[in-house]
Amino acid sequence: SMSENGVGNLAPFSYFGLMGHDPPTLAFSVCRRGPGKPKDTSENVLATGECVVNIMSEWYVEAANHSCGDFPPEVDEMDAAGLTKVPSTHVKPPRVGEAA
């Protein structure tokens, strides 16, 4: 996802589901940091209505797992993990170049 200010967010999710293809519909659940403290993914998706799904390849699992650290909102986890940003076609958040 990406904040309204353009700060990227990369968050690994173990479980998500595709609910339909026309229109494309995705379901996922985001935990909170604590009572009343939403995570960046929730705030970004609710504010912008956009996100990108990347399917992790096994060969870069350590870099992807690094992105699940407790980073402050102003830190782009894709940069912190050393992953490659690739422009998306229809939304502002970039894709992960290493993704399957």
Image: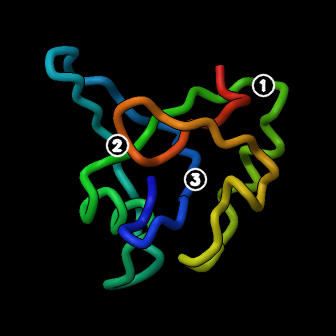
Q: How crowded is mark 1: few (under 14 residues within 10 Å), some or many (20 or more)?
A: few
- Is the residue 65 above or below the residue 26 in the image? below
- Work out which residue is located at the far left of the displayed protein and give it: 22
Residue located beneath label 3 in the image: 10
Residue located beneath label 2 in the image: 28
**Which one is earlier in the sequence, the residue at label 1 or at label 2?**
2
**Residues at marks 1 and 2, CA–CA distance in whole angstroms:** 21 Å
Q: Residues within 10 Å of mark 3 (few under 14, many from 20)?
A: many
- Is the residue 42 above or below the residue 11 in the image? below
> Viewer-proximal residue, 43 or 31?
43
**In x, y percent, where is residue 64?**
72, 44
Q: Is residue 14 left or right of residue 23?
A: right
The residue under the point 78% across, 25% down is 58
**Residues at marks 3 and 1, CA–CA distance in whole angstroms:** 17 Å
**In x, y percent, where is residue 15?**
46, 36
> Viewer-proximal residue, 9 or 35?
9
**Residues at marks 2 and 3, CA–CA distance in whole angstroms:** 14 Å
Query: What type is the residue that disc 1 sits on?
Result: Glu
